[in-house]
Amino acid sequence: GDSVTQMEGPVTLSEEAFLTINCTYTATGYPSLFWYVQYPGEGLQLLLKATKADDKGSNKGFEATYRKETTSFHLEKGSVQVSDSAVYFCALGFNKFYFGSGTKLNVKP
Amino acid sequence: GAGVSQSPSNKVTEKGKDVELRCDPISGHTALYWYRQSLGQGLEFLIYFQGNSAPDKSGLPSDRFSAERTGGSVSTLTIQRTQQEDSAVYLCASSLETGGVGAFFGQGTRLTVV
């Protein structure tokens, strides 16, 4: 069945470090792919999305590229800030959404 | 409204009681989803409504759980005879059409069964 696997956390980085959170998916068709973010005490927010192969989604300095050949949608940011500390969820969407288990990111000053 | 609204934000109930959780989606969104997030866990799909089609109930964990959507707008998730394992945050989301465009989530209802 359709599913998403993302790297386990927590991930702890120093401010201005490079971030990668790995996400791979299994799907029977060609889904859209998403990254959601959940800041402490807040609800889930859509961070970025890509709707077809080779599309790159970007927002707030974060990027992810839809790679059909490796079934991946890794999240990257060149220089993280303390304010990026949150839980990040990778998801795929057809008519409903399948979410990964979430990766907690801690950024230290 | 401007976003997805859920009520109540917190609910404490005694084991064995019934609870109703409400979701008011973004106006014009035809798709509505319910998910459950247990402490430190990912999101578990419960049910999905799309327009006038029959809902996808494949994620409901038992027959104690049911949901309805009236007039294609407001949805109510009902849990009968609550158990302690039902304690979780129940999230509602809506989207313009199907999952391909992304969904917007409400703040959730934190349910605690004591």
Image: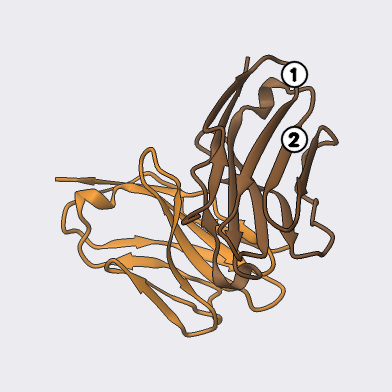
- Element type at marker 2? strand
Look at mark 1 in the image and give the residue it sits on.
B17
Look at mark 2 in the image and give the residue it sits on.
B78
Quarter of the figure that contains the C terminus of chain B: top right
**Residue that appears at 60% across and 58% down:** B94
The disc placed on residue B69 is: none
Q: Residues within 10 Å of mark 1 (few under 14, many from 20)?
A: few
Q: Nearer the viewer, residue A32 or A20?
A: A32
Q: Nearer the viewer, residue A47 or A107?
A: A47
Q: Nearer the viewer, residue B6 or A28?
A: B6
**Residue that appears at 79% across and 22% down:** B81
Whether residue B7 is visible, yes or no, is yes
Report in which chain the residue with disc 2 lies.
Answer: B
Report in which chain the residue with disc 1 lies.
Answer: B
| In the image, residue B1 above or below residue A33 | above
- Determine the CA span between mark 2 and mark 1: 11 Å
The quadrant holding residue B26 is bottom right
Chain painted brown = B
Q: Colour of chain A?
A: orange
| In the image, residue A98 above or below residue B86 | below
Q: Whole-percent x and y of residue B68?
A: 78, 47
Q: Whole-percent x and y of residue A12?
A: 28, 46
Question: Is the residue under label 1 in contact with that under label 2 (CB below 8 Å)?
Answer: no
Looking at this view, name the residue that lies furthest to the bottom: A54
Q: How is the image coloured?
A: by chain
Q: Is residue B91 left or right of residue A63?
A: right
Q: Nearer the viewer, residue A71 or A104?
A: A104
Three-letter residue code for mark 1:
Lys
**Residue that appears at 77% across and 39% down:** B61
